[in-house]
Image: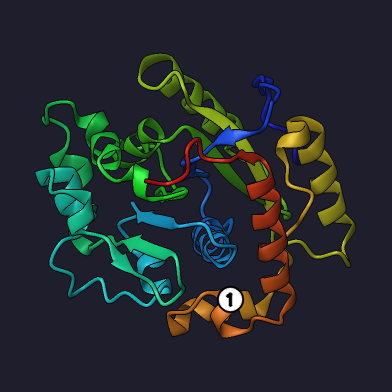
Amino acid sequence: MTSVESEEVPVETDAHNYPLPRIMAVANQKGGVGKTTTTVNLGACLAELGFRTLIIDLDPQGNASTGLGIDNRNVDTSMYHVIMHEAPLENCIEPAAVKNLFVAPASLDLAGTEIELVPAFSRENRLKRAIEQVQADYDYILIDCPPSLGLLTVNGLTAATEVLVPIQCEYYALEGVGQLLRNIEMVKSHLNPELNVSTVILTMYDGRTRLADQVATDVRAHFGDKVLRTVIPRSVKVSEAPGYGMTILGYDPGSRGAMSYLDASRELAQRGAPREGGRP
């Protein structure tokens, strides 16, 4: 039910202490796992802890943007312009309502990028080059990748040094994860040797069910200490917050969901090494 498909995909052991700035692609080819929700709320919690955090919305649905209160129908410069026309990323970035949190929004135009990029020169490295111009200004850069392995996700994986994989504690939890890991290995081999699956976070956890515990056990058995100790509970409040353009910290800061994402962000931060020489 929850094994990583038929063939085992090796998972490297971790030394932790990842240096800042940390550039993390949040990816899972299976939809509905809490990928965007995790990106937005982890980003908000890292910002709350004092880390300058940038969320890059690379998903044409633009849910990370709207979940942070950005009207992506009326932005002058979006990730479409950064990827397709190589506009400077700094021209796209907007401050979110949370102090220290910034967002590079997606727009509906991004949906056509998969096709438009096909003949483009150096098409896999567009995002990497854009991030290089701004990464010194941030401690964490979280890239919300689409739930598919197209050229946008390849751009995200090529630009990142780490991959964070959200996995939901439900039936077929690891469906597609084996393929995701193989795709990450392909990107690592051909485009980005620095890439590493550093973090797995369990989402939609319902402690009342044996299934949730079984999934958590299976995931920890496969990924070891890459899995955060903190699990994110299934929460109506967490689901409601994006509809108001808010993170869970703004919508209901005392909720179990908010406390869990704060704990997860602290755990994530503990795995990072201090920035050498401080931020410029």
Q: Position of residue 123 (x, y in %)?
A: 20, 31
Tag 1: amino acid: Ile
Which residue sits at x=50%, y=21%?
Answer: 185
Which residue sits at x=71%, y=23%?
Answer: 13
Q: Position of residue 191 (x, y in %)?
A: 35, 20
Q: Relative to the observer, which residue lies in front, 130 or 257? A: 130
Q: Quadrant of the N terminus?
A: top right
Q: Position of residue 188 (x, y in %)?
A: 45, 20
Colouring chosen for the image of the structure: rainbow
| Relative horizontal placement of residue 265, taking residue 141 as reference (left or right) | right
| Relative horizontal placement of residue 69, taking residue 142 as reference (left or right) | left
Q: Relative to the observer, which residue lies in front, 76 or 176? A: 76
276 over 97 or under it: above or below: above
User: Which residue is farthest top?
Assistant: 189
User: Which residue is farthest front?
Assistant: 277
210 over 235 or under it: above or below: above
| Relative horizontal placement of residue 24, taking residue 165 as reference (left or right) | left
Q: Residue at label 1?
A: 248
Which residue sits at x=17%, y=58%?
Answer: 91
Residue 112 showing in the rendered view: no
| Relative horizontal placement of residue 109, taking residue 35 as reference (left or right) | left
At label 1, counting other C-alpha atoms closer than 10 Å, the crowd grade (few under 14, some 14-19, many 20 or more) is: many
Q: Secondary structure at mark 1?
A: helix
User: Can you tell which quarter of the image residue 130 is in?
Assistant: top left
